[in-house]
Amino acid sequence: MKPKMRTKVLIITILLSMVLTGCATLFSTMVVDSAPESIDETIRVIPTQTVTPALTPNPFSLAGLKARTYGTGELSIEYTWEEREEFTRYKIIYDSDNLSIHGFVNIPTGNGPFPVVVALHGYIPASEYETLDYSTRYADSIARKGYIVLHPNLRNFPPSDSVGRKRDYQSGYVIDVMNLLAHARDLAGQPGIFENADLSRMGVWGHSLGGGTALRLAGLVDEIQAAVLYGAVSQRYTNENTGIEILDYENTNASFSVHHGVLDNTISVAWSQRLCAQLEDAGKEPECFFYEDQPHTFYRLGDGDALFIKRTIEFFDRHLKDT
């Protein structure tokens, strides 16, 4: 073979060797990259997850009211309204869901600490309602015996703001009280009228519409230990006829004192009789009083109203002071 021919053969051999070596390397890499171990590391089966959407409670139910936030805005003491030997009355205005709610607070004379009672008025036409209306005498009687009494003008009762009455099972009135209590909690123990307020010992007093609101509050506020219900709207809204839980008699910490005039032509006395049976069925031991000669709002003068006030004070003393 000639020298030039040998050189060409040598070059071709070298090139062929390089090509074969590269293919072998490439093939080797492909085999390694496609090994089962690598597939296991790069491909994963993601299990299917079933997400159950959270159920939003009815806003007018106890669960819905418990889920709310209360106490935004502020409570202001407008002025000292009246000074008496046993207590001082203050005019208040506070925020409740963008509404301005008026009312008064009675603070007993002394150093306390004092239990707190919420007094809730009944329905009076807006054109006739006044802050110091018929329910004032009951609030004052309670304050004289050493209780801080919170008496709000509920929404729709001047001079509080009005949003109109709607079928919310009295939730708007409940919300107004819950906001008032939240403001009082924020101010309790601080210098001012709520400095000696003991909100761990609470009672509620409610007449007519206020009595129905008090029933709802008893199932909502754990600190309420005593509820006085006076000619209460107790059967208009129940769990059965609303389809939601708006009342809870079994799990409440409250004891109940029920009062009703037999001559009541506004709210049937049968409602309170039924209420007493419902409370007993729930395992409670309510005290129930029916006044033979009294109408929906007891006569201011006479033995019936005085007896009712006496029984109210004794009931609160047993459950809020003697414990």
Image: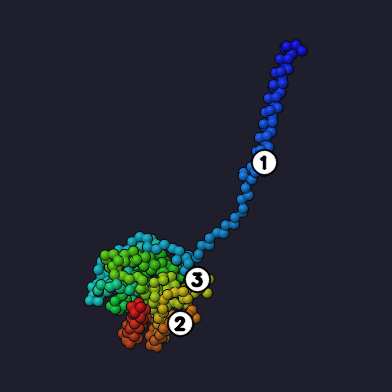
Upstream in sequence: badge 1 or badge 2:
1
Residue 169 percent across, percent down from the top left: 46, 70
Q: Tell me, what colour scheme is on the image?
A: rainbow
The CA span between labels 1 and 3 is 62 Å
Is 189 on the left or on the right of 169, as rendered? left
Upstream in sequence: badge 3 or badge 2:
3
The CA span between labels 1 and 2 is 79 Å
Q: Nearest the camera: 103 or 115?
A: 115
Residue 170 percent across, percent down from the top left: 44, 70
Q: Residue at x 51, y 70 (%)?
A: 244
Residue 69 percent across, percent down from the top left: 41, 62
Q: For the N terminus, which image quadrant?
A: top right
Tags 1 and 3 touching, CB below 8 Å: no
The CA span between labels 3 and 2 is 19 Å
Q: Residues within 10 Å of mark 2 (few under 14, many from 20)?
A: many
State the image quarter where residue 136 is shown: bottom left
Residue 29 percent across, percent down from the top left: 66, 35
State the image quarter where residue 296 is shown: bottom left
Mark 3: which amino acid? Glu
The numbered mark at residue 35 is 1
Is 199 on the left or on the right of 36, as rendered? left
Residue picked out by circle 3: 245
- Mark 1 or mark 2: which is in front? 1
The numbered mark at residue 24 is none
Residue picked out by circle 2: 276
Q: Is residue 234 visible?
A: yes
Mark 1: which amino acid? Ala
Q: Nearest the camera: 39 or 24?
A: 24
Q: Nearest the camera: 220 or 161?
A: 220
Q: Secondary structure at mark 1?
A: loop
Q: Residue at x 34, y 66 (%)?
A: 185
